Amino acid sequence: MSEFVDLETQDGVRMTWNTFPGTKQEALSCVIPVAAMYTPLKPIPDTPVLPYSPLRCRICRSILNPFSVVDYVAKIWVCPFCFQRNHFPQHYMSISEENLPAELFPQYTTIEYASSPDTGPKMPSVFLFVVDTCLIEEEIMFLKSALSQAIELLPENSLVGLITFGTYVQVHELGFGHMPKSYVFKGSKEITKEQLLEQMCFFAGRPRPNMGVIAGPRDGLSPESIARFLLPASECEFVLNSVLEELPRDPWPVPADQRASRCTSTALSIAASLLGLCVPGSGARIMAFVGGPSTEGSGSIVSKNLSEPIRSHKDLDKGAAALYNKAVKFYEVLSKQLVHQGHVLDLFACALDQVGVAELKVAVERTGGIVVLAESFGHSVFKDSLRRIFQSTDYDLGLAFNGVFEVNCSKDVKVQGIIGPCASLEKKGPLCAETVVGQGNTTAWKMCGLDKKTSLCLIFEIARKDGPESISQHTSNQFYFQFLTYYQHSDGQMRLRVTTLSRRWVTSPADVQELLAGFDQEAAAAVMARLVSLKMEIEDDFDPIRWLDRSLIRLCSKFGDYQKDSPSSFSLSPRLSIFPQFMFHLRRSQFVQVFNNSPDETAYYRMILNRENVANAVVMIQPSLISYSFHSSPEPVLLDVTAIAADRILLLDSYFTVVVFHGASIAQWRNAGYQNQPEHETFAYLLKAPREEADTIMKERFPVPRLVVCDQHGSQARFLLVKLNPSVTYNSNNPPPPGGDIIFTDDVSLEVFLDHLQRLAVQ
Amino acid sequence: MESASPFAPGPPRQRPAMVPNPTGIVRSMAPSPAPPPFGSAHPGSSHPVATTFASRSPPPGAIPQGPIAGNGPPVSGGFAAPRTVPPPWAQLAPPLAASSSIRLPTPSAAAIQDSGPQSFPGSPPSGASVAALPTPFVGPPTSQPFGRPPTSQSPFSGPPGSQLHFAGAQYSQRPMAGSTNSQLPLAGPPTSQSPFLGPPTSQPPFTGPPSSQPPRPNTPQPPFAGLPTSQQFGGPSTQTLTGPLISQVVGPPTSQPYAGRSSSPSHMTTPSSQPFSKPPTVGTSFGSPVWPSQPGQMVPSLPGNVQAPPRMFGMPPGMPGQPIPPVPPAMGHSALAGPQVSAQSKIDPNQIPRPVPSSSITIFETRQGNQANVPPSATSIFVVKDNGNCSPRLMRCTLNQIPCTGDLLSTSSMPFALMVQPLALPHPSEDPIQVVDFGESGPVRCSRCKSYINAFMRFIDHGRTFVCNLCGFTNETPHDYYCNLGPDGRRRDADERPELCKGTVEFVATREYMVRDPMPAVFFFLIDVSLNAIQTGATAAACSAISQSLADLPDGPRTMVGIATFDCSIHFYNLRRASQQPLMLIVPDIHDVYTPLHTDVVVPLAECRQSVEQLLESIPSLFENNKVSDSAFGAAIKAGFLALKPTGGKLLVFQSVLPSVGIGSLSSREAEGRTNVSAGDKEAHKLLQPADKTLKTMAIEFAEYQVCVDIFITAQTFVDIASISVVPGTTGGQVYYYYPFSALSDPGKLYNDLRWNLSRPQGFEAVMRVRCSQGLQVQEYAGSFCKRIPTDIDLPAIDCEKTIMVTFKHDDKFQDNSECAFQCALLYTTVYGERRIRVINLSLPCTNMLTNLFRTADLDTQFACILKQAASGVPVNSLSQVREQITNLCINILHAYRKFCATVSSSGQLILPEALKLLPLYTLALVKSIGLRNDGRFDDRSYWASHVMSLSISLAVPLVYPRMISIHDLTAKENDGSLSSSNIPLSSEHINDDGIYLLENGEDCLIYVGNMVNPETLQKLFGVTSVDGLPTQLVLQQFDNDLSEKLSDVMNEIRQQRCSYLRLRLCKKGDPSGVHFMSYMVEDKAPGGLSYVEFLVHVHRQIQTKMA
């Protein structure tokens, strides 16, 4: 599997099948779709950034790459996608076999072009804070302090704006020197961009142009009128801090039997329109800090009456959540607006209650926004995550803006769509498959916000219908992909990253081994997770367990080694051996078993899943478990209840939570304070080791995971137990090992699952 | 009730202006709780005058008290005021006196004051001679032809002499004509009677006249039979034009001589008094033929007696003083006609009736001898003693006797209405209105009509029951309120209980009268900060005015203030914040407004005074660079309303431009009207109607939540006051108009207007109802209020200046001897949060006699009524229609009088009822007033109309017929009473090029500078040496010289009197401003109207046409 990781290191791409099934038919029989997980901004060491514009094919607009055939004499290059012969322009005339431009170096399959300073101005990034004020005093204090920390960390040249909301929306005019000043909008009423233009006096004293869409300085908005609301961080830090410091709770009284009146949707809509007016087309983020459910405006998720509970998954399934569809529709419209403007919506949802992440998901995901869900603004998950966004350390998120992602492929491969944080630009072309998955029917996608780790899942379709005979007629069974990503780098520069890949077809349909050799189990698990999540969301009456089981059975039937109807004869190639285990855990994961979670949590998990790379997705599906004990050095152990032992410390990383689990004896010793005694230095070390490891994990990860430190038999231990394979339960035959534990569940264990799989696969 | 006392003596409530009386039951209001209307000068303006202005109440000492001085009722303390009467022979030279008075005001004025008193002792001649001397040149004959014998009296402020005369007349006339009209035959003779002189001395002159009446066949004319008494007080109220003498008669019916009004009918039958009756009949006739305009008609009718005596018929031909041979009355008319046609120019305009101000204080007892007294003129200075009827300041009726039937009323053509000014300022020396607390049970009321206990409710059955004076229902006396009756049939405690002996009392309201706790005093200021307002300095002026006025708001924790500004959006300010700095909250949605905060938009003044002041100081600079020229006025007041909605309160709006955006936005209709001239003339009045219903609907909602809107318009252009004024007009507020606003000269007035608005006595969340005796019903209320149910009017705010007109109609008959009662009840909350019911009672006698109606007609009130009716007609009818209506009304009234009250023989004369002798002048002035002139701007007219609707009587008259005095010679005049005694008729004849004149109408003050003025005078008054050096925008400064100080004194006096700071404007001859000034000369012939003389001719001709 390491070869796949190497490939990823080079280009940021992992594919389910690294050798492609030869025909459409065969691809279908392979069960796992042909897909690529691509991380466009993955930091790749030594990738050169070329300070000039790329050379494009005259016909297909693909970019000169190492796979192009170059005639050094004629100064001609042949496009590998359309086989068009292109002349090099004048400034490439010195090209020769010894004097290659960087883009033709074979190792630079991924390369970046940067706009020269004179072609594109550096655009400051814009941060518009949208802050909920319907909070209890304590929460508001937490939020204020977190925000003021964040403000300190803001890049100096970035522009900042502030909107607060509760019953009403307040747009703060930070550029007004005399006194704090804000525009107040009614929460229950939608305001269009036009109205905003009118009402915020953007044309005060001057005739407004009477044609077309008006936005930005180019259309006649004076910089001064924009600078009222968006100011360089360095200029407005004082004002911003003083406004935040005095930020009161929403002053409108809330009856005891009612929820606070919170107009999240109106606030976001106004924020979007404001950015649309002031900085259209340049990178900007709306950072929404929401502390409770939206009850006012088009995006409200629940009525104010406390006797009405917030929708659950059950309500959604039954269609009993009256406001849900309306809200989703609203946010779909909002997401279109944001995508059009190239702006990002980030969501920081911190409340014990649901705040409406499920409804907001569409807007956040399509714009590539960041989402953080925590119980409180005082929680480290929120505080540390927020800090991470602005901190420029090694773990810098590398926030980029305003990206456009495009795909080029060779003939016979089409794109069904992308599952991930992007939005279709509806650029149709011959490359588009008829079947659409996720954001499809296009060859270009908008990525309003993206960062180093943002990973797209591209689903391909093999369009080739003819048999292998025709393949042999080709000179080569190689074919190519080219991924183009334009984006506004965090330093304000516009860049273009080009990744060009080559893969080959399976030469003969019968060559299962060849196919298998290119199968990437982890990537497949990640893709299946995204797929099943997507289907659960958009397909009515979709049975994810059944779909996953059938897929797995079909896969095993096709690629397993067995005699028909003889389960015991069944074996799987190492290329495939751990895939069933992934599927087992995926079935048990929060992505599929949604009923333990609120719709908000589910939406949150899925949004993270859809933007993470393969490695992280795998952790989400099948958490890693490391054991610390006196007997051995830290070692990964099976994700099984049998891993629990009284004298062990377990470190579980399930991506969203990191659990440090002390066995019963360890806990006793620790409580007795042995670690403080010099003679038990090793014990102290043993206690410390998993914590350090956990810290390391948390430092790298965004959003910062929740750290749970617990003891065996403690209540918090459930965070561990829920993830473990229930091989020992209250009614299983085998007793737990001494000091071990049991899980109270009726769920099947991995063994039972695999038994059934074997039985069904051989039928 | 365990307590024996009907009054639960609650703990005395503290309130600044209240002085608890020792018993703790009845509290009295300090005489002048109102702060002075004008405080220290606006800092911005260096007006030195203002400081002296500070105390509002006119110094009583300043005005000579005495029966003589005033033209008001002569009564003081039951002592019948002696009037100087020109001696008989003085009349011989009436013209002399008359002319002299006009030309030489100073001497004549002096004559009045000095000679008047002296004459009592019985030396009339001396006084008369003084008057006569200065004007030897005017030949008596000339005046006579015009039938203006009484001219001599005019210099003497007519009244003095005439009284006696008419008194007699009244009696005598009745029998004869069957109506009270009094014709004044050459008036002269009667004047000579002085009550004190006793008949013998004074009458000799008269003896003649009585006998001289040829026309009256049945006049037996016993020379003096019983006359003296009756004459003195009979006060026939009629006057002919010629006889200005008579005018004062009305008021005085003071004492016993007059006592039984009931007795008057009996007189009717007694012809005995006739001898005098003639002369007394005051109808002076203008020889109708006089006027050139009617030559055709008149001439034929005239026998052609050129030599016809100038006087009326009534004149006994054989009058000793008369130079002219007696002429049969009928001939008299015609005779006049002849000569006058040819010599119109000889008509001496000085002879025609003009208001004659008095500077003396009179004391007015509202009732005497169980009879209502006829109140003095609303414009005079008087002190009221409330002994049963309310003070006429609070409520007065157009008629002081109520016609028994509707027919009688319609025959008279006179309007029948009450003017109610429920919180009117008292005179400082009047007793305060007493506050009565009935404790838990609340005031005693009639159980049927719910009227409140008052002095006219009759207790019977030993006090166990009482009969309601309004509905006649017999109620049981509440146990706690029981009291035995005295021998006179009154309750023994009647005199101790204010509600049983006073016309006006205030009851403490109980819970029953509150739908919620009494509201706090809340003031919300809304300031225009649009481009125009900033640039013209209006915003700065408003902020500074508010800031200074804060000190005058009621003290206490319950006083709340809020501030918002607006241009194309509305800016609220959160004034209560941790940091001192306020927070500006902008409401940009001007189609659907809201308040941005739940609390803290309106804050307690005591807590936040500093931040409020700070904010006001910074507002002008905050918006210094504002480029927004739009104004969302409608949305702003809506937003202000929302802020006030929980409590109610006053919304004070400072507006500078036409509301152009948002709710209730308006278009520049004026300009549209102008471009469309052809349709414009016919439809012009439509521009005086509100543009649409939006603001009206809003205003009704405001009123429902007790929000009152006052609007200060500081505009440079059209702002559509017609539409805007609906809001204050419906919410009990008012419009202040500063056009064109000048940052130099207007801030002073703006500040003082605001200050007075905030500090004058006022009430909130008021409901008012007027009840009247059975037989009448309220027809309509008019003024600034909101009416949601037919019987009551809602007044979100009511102040001391707001006047409400209530018209009545008959639904039944009254008995001739009965009294008709009116009761106005005003339930309101004081600025200190006390709930009160002010009950104002007026009981007037009923009469079957048209004569009585005319005799007791109240000119000022009637005129105010006509004015208001004209104003309400302005938006509905075209200007010419409105003018015609009021002219016709005048004609109809005079015609009614002429037809039913004057003698038959007088057909050729214009005969005016004494009480209404100024009606034609006022009517003419009204026709020429800004509101009814053709050339007025729409805004001016709308403002005028809205201003008039709630205007008090005492301000209504000057508004239409302003006061003009000369100021270049101020120092030369007498020290006291300089203001009132030196009024100049509003005619350009009286304007000299070397003079400086001051004209004021209670609103504006114009200073006119002729082009030949002595530079020294200019230097003294204005600090410049030439007319050209005068600034166009005048800020009056006080210089260190007599004249300037005097002018300041005069200004202050006027301001105090009008409770208004007055907008100063300088007018120069030969300048547009001079033309403007001249437009106030209502007696002149103007492009838009007749001269006074012409108008009289017109009226007369119309009457004649009707008679024929």
Image (cartoon, rainbow, N blue to C red):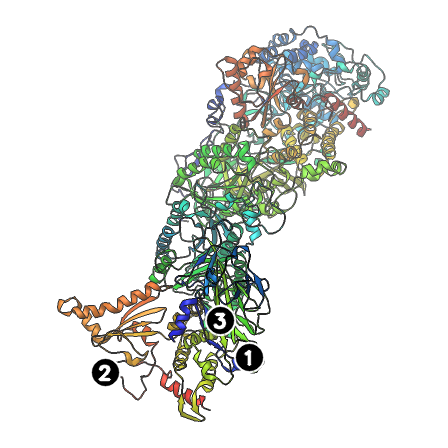
Q: Nearer the viewer, residue B119 or A414?
A: A414
Label 1 or label 2, whichever comes before in sequence order: 1
Circle 2/circle 3 CB separation < 8 Å: no
Q: Which residue is mark 2?
A: A738
Whether A84 is drawn above or below B569: the answer is below
Task: Check the residue under mark 1 and report the chain it is in.
Answer: A
Q: Amino acid at mark 1?
A: Ile
Which element type, helix, strand or loop, lies under badge 2? loop
Task: Check the residue under mark 3 and report the chain it is in.
Answer: A
Label annotation for residue A471: 1
Q: Marks 1/2: CA distance?
A: 61 Å
Whether A376 is drawn above or below B269: the answer is below
Q: Marks 3/1: CA distance?
A: 16 Å
Q: Amino acid at mark 2?
A: Pro
* Residue B794 picture quarter: top right
Q: Amino acid at mark 3?
A: Ser
Circle 1/circle 2 CB separation < 8 Å: no
Task: Check the residue under mark 2 and report the chain it is in.
Answer: A
Label 2 or label 3, whichever comes before in sequence order: 3
Label annotation for residue A507: none
* Residue A253 picture quarter: bottom left
Label 3 or label 1, whichever comes before in sequence order: 1
Q: Position of residue B291 (x, y in %)?
A: 78, 19
Q: Position of residue B961 (x, y in %)?
A: 64, 25
Circles 3 and 1 on the same subunit:
yes
Whether A698 is drawn above or below B592: the answer is below
Q: Is residue A376 left or right of residue B208?
A: left
Label annotation for residue A502: 3
